[in-house]
Amino acid sequence: MLARSKTAALNVVVGRSERVTQRTPFDYDHITRHQSRLAFAVKTAVLELSRIKNLHISRGNLALADSSYKEIIELLDAPAPLLETVEIVDANLPVNLFAGVSPVLTGLVLSACSFNMQLPIAANLRTLKLCNAPAESKVPVDQFISALSTMTRLEVLHVIDSLDHHHDDEDDTVRRHDDGVTVQSPPVLRVAKLPELTELSIDTLLTNCIFFLDHIVSPTFTRVSVKYRMDLAGMDDMDDDISVVRGFAEKFGPRVRGPIRSMKLHKNSIKVWRSLHTSSSSRPASPPDLEVSLPVLSTYEPAAECFIRSLDLTHMESLIFDCPFSLDLLKTYFSDLIHLTTVQIAGKYAIVLLSALAVGLPRSRSATGAGPSKLKFLTLETLGIRGWDFEEAPTVFHMLKSCLMGRKRAGTPLSILIMDDCVVDANEDLHVDQLRAAVLRKLVWNGLHIRALSIDSDDE
């Protein structure tokens, strides 16, 4: 087939299959007999690298020996003048990948691969995704920034668990004076200017994350995902971590503009969707997605009007004990959420979260200049509760009553969602004791499977 089409561009997919077939019982002799043929067929295809337009290589469902797979990867050291997109999984790539010749390469996706970031093939990339690099192949973040500085056409950048610590002072280059004294000379680190970057996703250690974002220059993003991991076991370092996060918030926060519409808080990160305010028709109409970490809220200063409508706390149950400052942070932040329509909570610590909402909250901005006041949820329409224990039901609903005290009657009833089922409307008012009794009956009748309840709360 390859001989009959000597000039046609090829799309080569190695190892990805929609269907997995397996003999029963598993025929190892059959695999052994075909391993050499399979390796030969794959090598024959990869040897046509100069004609390949799109290339995907992974072990997938192939029964290739490690040595055969390594030999296939080593064939990628030839020029690839037609290559546009590459996706490679679990490979130690050649140092001179594509012999440095791939002038039209625009998409590069590497998962669990080692990769030489200094290759000239990256100059025209529009999409770069690096995921789960082996520990010995992680790229120092400062070297990665230097490499990015040559990728000025980059539009999409994903870096997931692939960065190593930047060089410390003792690792910097040294310079010897004429008098024989050796001093450290800090390396020249270029700032990566990426004028076309619109989508950024990074997941790495906190210090790497801050260093990376501090050396990226880009206009307003349309979609941003930033996650980091920090060691909460050493609480002595918490103040230092928070100070670093504050610096991150000051430098990175202004790049995504517009009022916040929805926020999702969970153990490692927060999702914030911001509507994009721009008159340029070239910008996408959908709001950008910014995902940052919880401590950033400690520096967040809401505008005169905070437009958050939806708040999701369904994955925060462990964070409130892993990170002691988070409850005070939530209380302070919630004081400005005066337009909430939907709140979701979950987990066995739902009581703690409810208590954070129920207590008096200090208002940082008040039209009357009054002191601390209770958050009244005047606009709340839906409150979702999932995953709480049967024994905690009375306490949960006691907290609910405390949260709803003083709530003005809205045009639509407040829907309290239990578990993940649809809302069942109930127009009549229910006293909290009646509500608790009804829920407990449903717990017994349905074997702990609750459909849903809806109540309308008065100012009591």
Image (cartoon, grey):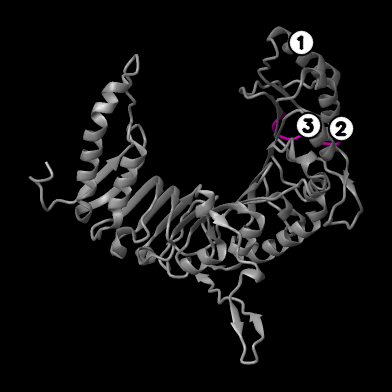
Please say if 278 is above or below 40.
below
Cα separation between marks 3 and 2: 17 Å
Cα separation between marks 2 and 1: 22 Å
Which SS class for mark 1?
A: helix
Q: Where is residue 243 in the image (x, y as percent from the top left)?
A: 76, 61
Determine the image quadrant of residue 68: top left
Amino acid type at circle 1 is Arg
Are the residues flagged by discs 2 and 1 in contact, CB closer than 8 Å?
no
Pointer 2: what residue?
A: 402
First to last magenta residue range:
406-414
Determine the image quadrant of residue 360: top right
Pointer 1: what residue?
A: 441
Q: Position of residue 319 (x, y in %)?
A: 74, 40
Q: Position of residue 348 (x, y in %)?
A: 76, 28
Q: Position of residue 337 (x, y in %)?
A: 75, 48
**Disc nearest the viewer among 3 and 1:** 3
Residues 102 and 420: in front is 102
Pointer 3: what residue?
A: 349
**Disc nearest the viewer among 3 and 2:** 3
Farthest residue in the bottom direction?
Answer: 178
Which SS class for mark 2?
A: helix
Are the residues flagged by discs 3 and 1 in contact, CB closer than 8 Å?
no
